Image (spheres, helix red, strand yellow):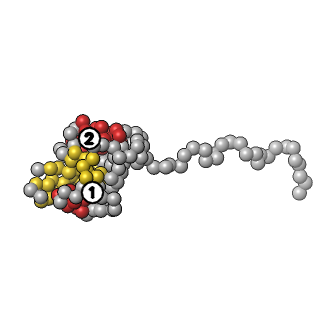
Amino acid sequence: MTILGVPSFGKGGLNSNLNPRFGRCTAFTFVTVEDGDIKEVKTVPNGAANAMGGAGIQAAQTIGNNGATAVIIGALGPNASQALNSLNVDIYQAPGQQVTVKEAVEKFINGELQKIAGANVGSHYGMGGGIGGGRGGGMGGGGGGGMGRRRNF
């Protein structure tokens, strides 16, 4: 028996798309596979999705807390990889194209997914670009009502 943890979009489930961002996915779909058949499906929200930092490590803890013995991932950073390895969770690379959780699990059952040893992207890969600093909200810029230029209207 294998319990797969699959990062998912939305609320998760077999018909949800696999989310390539492990630590920043919105939910995990846990699929129990036994004798080549899907026996049970459970979804769990990813509490780390909006974390300021350490999302991959927190997501790996969610995987471990739900008894997963393997994950199917798109992108996995070094910290999450170390955390999963310390939990003895096998890591499988998801297909390159967008697939549903069910399609990814079927590829796992059929032996079509490659087992990988660890991280396949750098740290902070899943972080959004954000607005960044320096958007011009300062106090300068003139336009004041100084007394230097009096006009008669």
Q: Secondary structure at mark 1?
A: loop
Q: Residue at x 29, y 55 (%)?
A: 94
The image shows residue 26, relative to residue 53, as above or below, that is below
Choose top left, top right, bottom left or bottom right for residue 98.
bottom left
Say left or right for 97 vs 151: left
In the image, farthest residue toward the right: 152
Say left or right for 76 vs 32: right
Q: Is residue 124 visible?
A: yes
In percent of width and height, residue 118 lies at 30, 43
Tag shown at residue 60: none
Tag shown at residue 12: 1
In the image, farthest residue toward the left: 35
As measured in the structure, the alpha-carbon distance from the residue carrying label 2 to the one carrying label 1 is 20 Å
Instruction: Name the mark nearer the viewer: 2 or 1.
Output: 2
Question: Tag 2: residue type?
Answer: Leu
In percent of width and height, residue 41 lies at 18, 56
Decide which of tag 2 and tag 1 comes sooner along the chain: 1
Q: Secondary structure at mark 2?
A: helix
| Other-residue count near label 1 (Cα within 10 Å), few / some / many at <14 / 14–19 / ≥20 | many
| Other-residue count near label 2 (Cα within 10 Å), few / some / many at <14 / 14–19 / ≥20 | many
In percent of width and height, residue 75 lies at 35, 50
Question: Tag 1: residue type?
Answer: Gly
> Which of 107/17 is in front?
107
Choose top left, top right, bottom left or bottom right for residue 42.
bottom left
Figure label count:
2
Quickly name the residue at label 2: 84
